[in-house]
Image: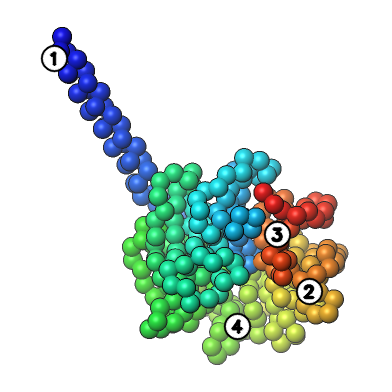
């Protein structure tokens, strides 16, 4: 009888070990993308990438909890903290969330003084398992293209330069000594404006590692959508403009000086600069100009049926319904 009990206990122990091994393998095995999936929209990533969505969830940096990483259903239900990291430049694919751990929060996101507070990180999309540090050096403007993250990497030798790293943490390499923004992506392509000799718009092929001139102009923060590129026109006091890439025809969409903008569902939401500063919107054809809220706002993000934006001074997060233009404080 004692031998039977011994074998039963031993068998149960072996099953437990095998089950744990399978579960650990499930948590830690590496998944790769089959296509050149992009992790977030250009407008969100230019605005710190505080919100990101997939078919089921919105992943976001919660301003009500020191900018920690959260998720919620598209209707705002099932709010869940993913971990205790403060997060920005959030990207998502079928298996993982990628983000930059911002340490001191959004107000210090452009400071590299606090070493190891802006690391490039990855976690499982379901929140299980540990955080994987892809690059422990300070980073900004992370953007997923297929199986690589393109981002700005900082070190004391070369300061801020453009890097890429595979989503498994391998193959880290410098792409350019210039810190190009890699926010605007379409499949394997990245669109960006020049920084050193011009502000033209270029197209970078991540597969061949080659670039091509797309449009000559004095442009800032281009957002490419099909055959149209939206940008701030530096030569015209940073007014919103668009160019038809098939004809090269430029159109000024509004005469306001713009601080930041986001293009979402045929509407451009932007911060108007100056004495009458306000959050405004205009359709992508230049019609239906609206003043949505007077004040100075920043970090305009879009997800679900809402536009999210912060008060520049208080850092309070607001949410605007794209269907009704109703604004409420967002405090999940």
Q: Nearer the viewer, mark 3 or mark 1?
A: 1
Q: Cα distance, mark 2 to mark 3? A: 18 Å
**Relative to 217, 237 lies left or right:** right
Q: Nearer the viewer, mark 4 or mark 1?
A: 1
Q: Say how the picture is coloured.
A: rainbow
Instruction: Assign a secondary structure to mark 1.
Output: helix
Q: Which residue is mark 2?
A: 272
Res 133 seen here: yes
First in sequence: mark 4 vs mark 2: 4
Q: Which residue is mark 4?
A: 200
Q: Quadrant of residue 107?
A: bottom right
Q: Cα distance, mark 4 to mark 3? A: 34 Å
Residue 90: x, y in percent? Answer: 54, 59
Q: Nearer the viewer, mark 4 or mark 2?
A: 2
Q: Cα distance, mark 1 to mark 2? A: 81 Å
**Residue shown at the point (81%, 74%) measured from the top left:** 277
Instruction: Assign a secondary structure to mark 4.
Output: loop
Residue 162: x, y in percent? Answer: 45, 75
Q: Which mark is residue 3?
A: 1
Q: Nearer the viewer, mark 4 or mark 3?
A: 3
Report the residue that reaches farthest toward the bottom. Answer: 197
First in sequence: mark 4 vs mark 1: 1
Residue 64: x, y in percent? Answer: 65, 55
Instruction: Assign a secondary structure to mark 3.
Output: strand
**Residue shown at the point (76%, 62%) measured from the top left:** 267
Residue 315: x, y in percent? Answer: 69, 65
Crowding at mark 4 (Cα within 10 Å: few <14, some 14-19, many 20+): some
Instruction: Assign a secondary structure to mark 2.
Output: strand
First in sequence: mark 1 vs mark 2: 1
Q: Which residue is mark 3?
A: 317
User: Who is closer to the viewer here, 173 or 193?
Assistant: 173
């Amino acid at each position: 009888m004692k031998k039977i009990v011994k074998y039963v206990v031993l068998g149960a122990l072996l099953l437990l070990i095998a089950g744990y091994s399978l579960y650990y393998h499930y948590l830690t095995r590496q998944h790769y993308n089959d296509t050149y999936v992009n992790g977030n929209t250009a407008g969100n990533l230019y605005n710190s990438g505080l919100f990101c969505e997939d078919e089921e969830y919105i992943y976001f940096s919660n301003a009500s909890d020191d900018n920690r990483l959260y998720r919620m259903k598209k209707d705002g239900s099932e709010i869940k903290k993913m971990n205790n990291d403060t997060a920005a430049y959030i990207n998502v694919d079928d298996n993982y969330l990628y983000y930059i751990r911002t340490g001191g929060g959004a107000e210090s996101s452009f400071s590299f003084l606090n070493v190891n507070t802006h690391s490039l990180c990855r976690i499982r999309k379901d929140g299980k398992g540990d955080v994987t540090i892809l690059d422990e050096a300070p980073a900004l403007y992370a953007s997923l293209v297929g199986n690589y993250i393109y981002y700005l990497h900082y070190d004391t030798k070369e300061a801020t330069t453009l890097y890429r790293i595979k989503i498994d943490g391998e193959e880290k390499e410098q792409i350019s000594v210039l810190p190009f923004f890699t926010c605007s992506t379409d499949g394997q392509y990245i669109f960006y404006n020049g920084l050193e000799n011009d502000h033209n718009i270029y197209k970078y092929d991540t597969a061949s590692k080659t670039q091509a001139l797309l449009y000559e102009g004095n442009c800032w923060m281009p957002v490419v959508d099909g055959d149209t590129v939206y940008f701030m026109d530096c030569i015209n006091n940073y007014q919103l403009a668009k160019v038809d890439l098939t004809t090269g025809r430029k159109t000024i969409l509004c005469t306001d000086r713009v601080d930041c903008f986001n293009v979402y569902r045929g509407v451009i939401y932007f911060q108007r600069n100056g004495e009458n500063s306000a959050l405004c919107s205009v359709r992508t054809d230049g019609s239906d100009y609206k003043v949505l809220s007077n004040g100075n706002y920043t970090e305009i993000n879009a997800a679900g049926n809402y536009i999210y934006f912060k008060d520049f001074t208080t850092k309070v997060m607001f949410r605007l319904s794209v269907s009704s233009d109703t604004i409420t404080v967002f405090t999940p």
